[in-house]
């Protein structure tokens, strides 16, 4: 029997622990984690236990792990945005192939440094552009490749970040501040820019962008709102962003389940919303209800940074009194945009626009692609996915793809698993398996994001040829 490919994990947070860790647990013949680096002891120990990693292969930081000689085939770099460059550079030097979470790095200089190091060492670098690997976007890509819509003329693409997700990640969370993380157009939409580049199949020629931070400022705070919601906020019954609504009553999760076409999820959402006490009681007898009553996944997971994982309402309230996630959304150190539009003209003449914002009623991407023979309209929501094909000649429309929300949709995201599978395949065959791209092609979406950021700040149109030249990419 073939031995599994081995890996080390740098950063056992949500992505490392759940997405890639779960892949290894479910595909033991393909992938085995043999070492982990994670400063939070509880996470490190939990990961080590699940993956049977001996204690002498558990490290408190990526530096300690990479100080050792090479331990495995792949290094998964799953630390936060500003901690990607150094571990990636060192891992490549040590002889690891690297699966690097997006964005490659938080500034363009470092992204380019990584690309050069990949080219110099000849290793394979995969970037966490997971949307390419989903059934939804693969389907769209194949339709276009087959020429079914004729020539693409224009794409309108939206990244609709649901209101609570924006507040969680981009106001209270790790991606709130450009200096501490990266511009939101990079952090959130290098995925979307990568999709546009992939689908259009041409380099971007010109980019312009507008947007800013409009709503989440102190002047929009309810009167008398304290810095922490649980410090007696007078707007607790009316503020959409009152932290206990999000993390204790899990209202956004209930809304997502309620919007799903899955009838069981609708019933469960109502049970959680209206009968939490009854759910507390039956979850003691029927364990499947426990997950719903004591919901642990995104965004609640982020409340726990080492303390005992007690998901009771009382424990969460205690955490929220001091946690960054308990802060008033109008009194944070956020400065990333809450809405931005990007216009792109590609070298083959196709035009595209991307809208990113943090005020959506539901989470997910929506797009329309207008071609010379047909139009595709797609919805890629967490609560369900569908693609409709409109043929201009016959005038007919057809639902060509549909997927309902699954109970475990967030935990076992199909794109994550597919990315790891393709990456392993590429390692074994020693050549890039589709749709994995080489480092330079992965860089393109980052170049587009930095160009959009620059255009927005400088009120200018970015000539991408000049931009690449300045970045020494040509
Ligand atoms: N591909 C995607 O769709 C996607 C989605 C979300 C996040 N991300 C990216 O994945 C990365 C990780 O995000 P996350 O949500 O898992 O964050 P996270 O905060 O949950 O995980 C990061 C982990 O790194 C650990 N860490 C900190 N210092 C370390 C060190 N010196 N050595 C080793 N580990 C260290 C932290 O303790 C934490 O557990 C980010 O760059 C993020 O932008 C990608």
Image (spheres, rainbow, N blue to C red):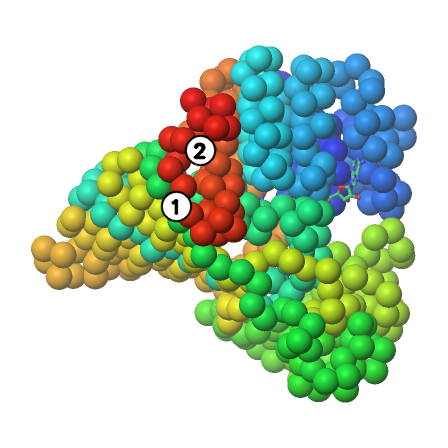
Relative to 184, 18 lies left or right: right
Q: Quadrant of residue 206?
A: top left
Where does ligand 1 appear, by image quarter? top right
Ligand 1 within 8 angstroms of badge 1 C-beta: no
The image position of residue 177, as x and y in percent, is: 68, 53
The image position of residue 106, as x and y in percent, is: 63, 39
Q: Quadrant of residue 241?
A: bottom right
Relative to 444, 345 lies left or right: left
**Which residue lies at the image location 83% right of the left edge and 53% below the top edge?**
305
Residue closer to the observer: 30 or 426: 426
Relative to 8, 64 lies left or right: right
Relative to 350, 5 lies left or right: right
Q: Secondary structure at mark 2?
A: helix
Q: Which mark is residue 461?
A: 1
Residue closer to the observer: 239 or 332: 332
The image position of residue 342, as x and y in percent, is: 42, 52
**Which residue lies at the image location 48% right of the left edge and 28% below the top edge?**
470
* For marks 2 and 1 on the same chain, the one whose residue lies earlier in the sequence: 1
**Which residue lies at the image location 68% right of the left edge and 16% below the top edge?**
93
Q: Quadrant of the N terminus?
A: top right
Q: Secondary structure at mark 1?
A: loop
Question: Label 2: few (<14), some or many (≥20) within 10 Å?
Answer: some
Q: Is residue 437 above or below residue 20?
A: above
Q: Which residue is mark 2?
A: 467
Q: Is residue 419 above or below residue 427?
A: below
How far apart are the two marked residues, 2 and 1, measured between alpha carbons? Answer: 11 Å
Q: Is residue 196 visible?
A: no
Q: Which mark is residue 469?
A: none
Question: Label 1: few (<14), some or many (≥20) within 10 Å?
Answer: some
């Amino acid at each position: 029997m073939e031995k599994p490919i081995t890996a080390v994990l740098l950063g056992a947070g949500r992505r490392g622990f759940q997405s890639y860790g779960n892949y290894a647990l479910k595909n033991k013949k393909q992938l085995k984690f043999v070492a982990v680096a994670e400063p939070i002891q509880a996470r490190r120990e939990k990961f080590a236990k699940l993956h049977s990693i001996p204690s002498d292969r558990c490290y408190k930081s990526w530096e300690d792990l990479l100080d050792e000689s090479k331990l495995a085939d792949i290094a998964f770099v799953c630390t936060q945005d500003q901690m990607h460059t150094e571990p990636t550079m060192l891992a490549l030097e040590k002889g690891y192939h690297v699966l690097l979470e997006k964005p490659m790095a938080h500034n363009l200089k470092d992204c380019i440094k990584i690309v050069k190091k990949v080219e110099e060492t000849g290793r394979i670098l995969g970037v966490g552009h997971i949307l390419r690997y989903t059934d939804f976007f693969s389907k769209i890509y194949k339709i276009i490749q087959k020429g079914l819509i004729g020539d693409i003329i224009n794409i309108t693409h939206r990244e609709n970040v649901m209101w609570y997700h924006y507040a969680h990640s981009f106001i209270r969370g790790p991606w709130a501040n450009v200096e501490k993380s990266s511009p939101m157009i990079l952090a959130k939409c290098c995925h979307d820019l990568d999709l546009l580049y992939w689908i259009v199949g041409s380099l971007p020629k010109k980019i312009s962008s507008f947007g800013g931070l409009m709503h989440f400022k102190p002047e929009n705070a309810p009167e008398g709102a304290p810095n922490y919601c649980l410090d007696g906020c007078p707007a607790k019954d009316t503020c959409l962003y009152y932290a206990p609504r999000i993390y204790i009553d899990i209202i956004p999760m209930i809304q997502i389940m309620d919007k799903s076409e899955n009838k069981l999820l609708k019933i469960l959402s109502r049970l959680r919303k209206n009968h939490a006490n009854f759910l507390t009681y039956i979850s003691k007898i029927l364990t499947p209800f426990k997950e719903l009553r004591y919901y642990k996944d995104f965004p609640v997971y982020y409340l726990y940074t080492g303390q005992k994982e007690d998901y009771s309402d009382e424990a969460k309230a205690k955490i929220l009194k001091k946690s960054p996630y308990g802060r008033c959304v109008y009194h944070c150190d956020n400065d990333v945009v809450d809405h931005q539009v990007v216009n792109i003209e590609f070298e083959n003449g196709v035009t595209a626009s991307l809208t990113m914002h943090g005020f959506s009623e539901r989470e997910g991407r929506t797009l329309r692609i207008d071609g010379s023979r047909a139009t595709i309209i797609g919805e890629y929501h967490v609560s369900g996915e569908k693609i409709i094909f409109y043929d201009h000649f016959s005038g007919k429309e057809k639902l060509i793809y549909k997927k309902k929300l699954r109970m475990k949709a967030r935990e076992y995201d199909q794109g994550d698993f597919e990315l790891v599978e393709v990456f392993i395949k590429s390692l074994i065959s020693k050549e890039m398996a589709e749709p994995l791209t080489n480092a330079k092609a992965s860089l393109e979406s980052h170049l587009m994001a930095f160009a959009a950021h620059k255009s927005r700040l400088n009120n200018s149109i970015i000539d991408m040829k000049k931009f690449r030249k300045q970045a020494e990419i040509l």
